[in-house]
Amino acid sequence: MDLTFFTLVYFLILFCLIAPPTEFRRSGLTIEYILSSYLGSENIDFIGYHVRRTTANLLFHSCLPLSYYIILILLNYLSAENYPFNPWAGGIYWDVYFYMSSSIALLAITLGYYWSSSKWQHHPIVTNLQQFGQPWRVVSSSVNNEFRRIEKFSSGELNFCTYITDSWILKTSTYTLLIAHKHDAKLSIVDSQTYQLAVDSPTAVQKLHIRVKSVQRGKCDFIIVLNSEKYQELTGMLEEPIENMRNLVIQQSLSDKFVVAFKEQVMRNVRYIIPENAPAPEQCIGCLTKSADVKLQKLCYPPQEGECRSCFCKPMWCLDCMGKWFACRQDQRRIETWLSSKAPCPTCRATFCVLDVCAIEIL
C-alpha cells in the first residue's frame, strides 16, 4: 500500500473516531462507548463522568501523532533496520516528527496525571466548580442530583451538548465542561446562521449563538449554539427572558408554523357554546398548564357524509396541543397537504379535519 494512501486512510479513520458519524455511533465505535466501564454513567455521576471523559479525550488525541509514527515503523514504511535503537531512521523530517509527537504525548500524560492527583482536585472542571462554593464535591452533588431529574433541557449530541437544569446551565465540549448558575447568568442572542439542508428542501436550519454571561466577575462567559426549533423549549426553562439586542429573526419550527395557521383557521370556525352555569373545562391533558379550550364536532359535511366522524368526547385539549397533535399525524414529506388532511381524535380516535375543531365560548 502506498504511504500517501495509507496516511489518508489512517487519518480518515482517526477523524471518524474523534468526530464519529452516525454509523460509528450506532456501531459503538466511540471513545465514550469503548471506555464506558471506566467513565461510568453520565446520568448517575454527571461531573465525575465528564472529568474522566475529558481526561481520556486529552490522552487519546495527544497520542495519535505518535501512534501514526509507530504504525509506520511496524508496517515497515520507514527504514527500521536499527529499530528500536534508531526508530527515526527515516530521515531528518521523521526525526523532528518523532521528537515532537513524543513530547506532545508525554506532556499530555503528565497533565492527565496532574489532573487526577489529589482525587481530581486540579482538574479544570473541578477548578470551575470551586467558583460556586466549597467544598467542590457539594456543588458537584447538586449538579448530579438535578441532572438525574427528567425535567431538564438538553440539546446537541455526543461531546457537544447543552443542558439546563433547575439551577445550572451546562455546556460540554471535547476537553472541558462549562458551568454557569442559572440565577446568576444573563443570556443574549449574539448571532444566527441559517443552513439549507438541500436545494429542493422547503425548510432550513437556523443556528442561534447565545452568550451565557455571569453577573459576578471572575466567572467565564461562554457561547451555546442552539437549533432555533428548541428556542421556545429553552425559554421555558429560564426565569429571565433572553435578550435579543440585534433584533434577530428567530425562525419557528415547521410544527410551530403549522400551529399558527391551524389556530387562525380554528378562530374562523363555528364556536362551541358552553352555558354559563355549566362546569368549567378541565385542564388540558396534553400540557397540563392551560384549560381545555377546543371541542371536536363534525361540521365539514352533513353527519353521514365524508370521512370525518362525530366526536362525543368532552373538551380535554387546548388549541396548541390539538394543533401539535394534528401536525404529528401528518405525512412529514407532504407539508402542503397538512391543512387539508385529517387526523384521529387523540382520545376516541374519531377522524376529524381542521374544520371540525371549534373554539370554546362560554356564555
Image: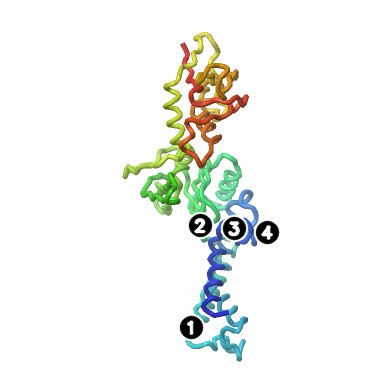
Which quadrant would residue 287 be assigned to in this image? Answer: top right
Residue 57, x across and y down, in percent: 56, 64
CB contact under 8 Å: marks 3 and 2: no
Identify the residue position indicated by label 4 in the image.
37
Q: Which mark is residue 173?
A: 2
What type is the residue that disc 1 sits on? Answer: Val
Q: Which residue is mark 3?
A: 23
Indicate which disc, 1 or 3, sits on the residue closer to the N terminus: 3
Q: Residue placed at 61% from the left, 26% from the top?
A: 349
Binning the other alpha carbons within 10 Å of mark 4 as few (below 14), some (14 to 19) or many (20 upward) gives few
Q: Nearer the viewer, residue 213 or 329?
A: 329
Identity, as a three-letter code, of the amino acid under mark 4 = Ser
Work out how far the residue at label 2 is from the one at label 1, CA to CA, in angstroms: 31 Å
- Disc 2 residue type (three-letter): Ser
Could you say which quadrant of the image residue 66 lies in?
bottom right
Give the spatial CA distance, label 1 vs label 3. 36 Å
The residue that label 1 is drawn on is 96
In front here: 352 or 29? 352
- At label 3, counting other C-alpha atoms closer than 10 Å, the crowd grade (few under 14, some 14-19, many 20 or more) is few
State the CA–CA distance, disc 1 to disc 4.
37 Å
Rendered residue at 53%/22% (across/down) = 292
**Which residue is rendered at x = 32% and y = 42% of the image?**
247
